[in-house]
Image (spheres, grey):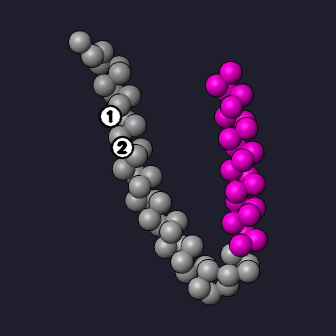
């Protein structure tokens, strides 16, 4: 039998997945717009975003240890 707590976690994870999928569409729309209007500047901004994402991932790794 599944525990109620586990079912709640799975329900919350599914909600997050649904929201993230919609937000991913928004990100792709933003990329298309940015690259069509200012590709060089877009590349520089995206590099900065990716660098900060890596920093966040490294911090999260500390939680998983």
Residue at left offset 68%, top offset 81%? 39
Residue at left offset 40%, top offset 59%? 22
Decide whether residue 56 is among the magenta residues: yes
Mark 2 residue element: helix
Residue sitting at the far left? 1
Name the residue tied to disc 1.
Answer: 11
With 13 as the anchor, is 53 left or right in this view? right
Position of residue 10 measured from the top left corner of the image (x, y, whole percent) = 35, 31
Decide whether residue 11 is among the magenta residues: no
Position of residue 50 measured from the top left corner of the image (x, y, whole percent) = 70, 57
Quadrant placement of the C terminus = top right
Determine the main secondary structure of the stretch shown in magenta: helix
Mark 1 residue element: helix
Residue at left offset 69%, top offset 66%? 46
Position of residue 57 measured from the top left corner of the image (x, y, whole percent) = 68, 41
Name the residue tied to disc 2.
Answer: 15
User: Looking at the image, is 47 positioned above or below residue 36?
Assistant: above
Instruction: Say how many tags the image has.
Output: 2
Span of residues in magenta: 43-65
Which of the 4 image quadrants contains residue 56?
top right
Tags 2 and 1 in contact by the CB under 8 Å rule? yes
C-alpha distance separating marks 2 and 1: 6 Å
Q: Mark 1 Cα within 10 Å, few/some/many (few <14, many 20+)?
A: few
């Amino acid at each position: 039998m599944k525990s109620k707590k586990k079912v709640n976690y799975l329900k919350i994870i599914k909600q997050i997945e649904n929201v993230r999928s919609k937000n991913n569409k928004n990100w792709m729309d933003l990329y298309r717009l940015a690259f069509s209007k200012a590709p060089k500047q877009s590349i520089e901004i995206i590099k900065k975003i990716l660098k900060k994402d890596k920093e966040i991932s490294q911090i999260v790794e500390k939680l998983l240890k």
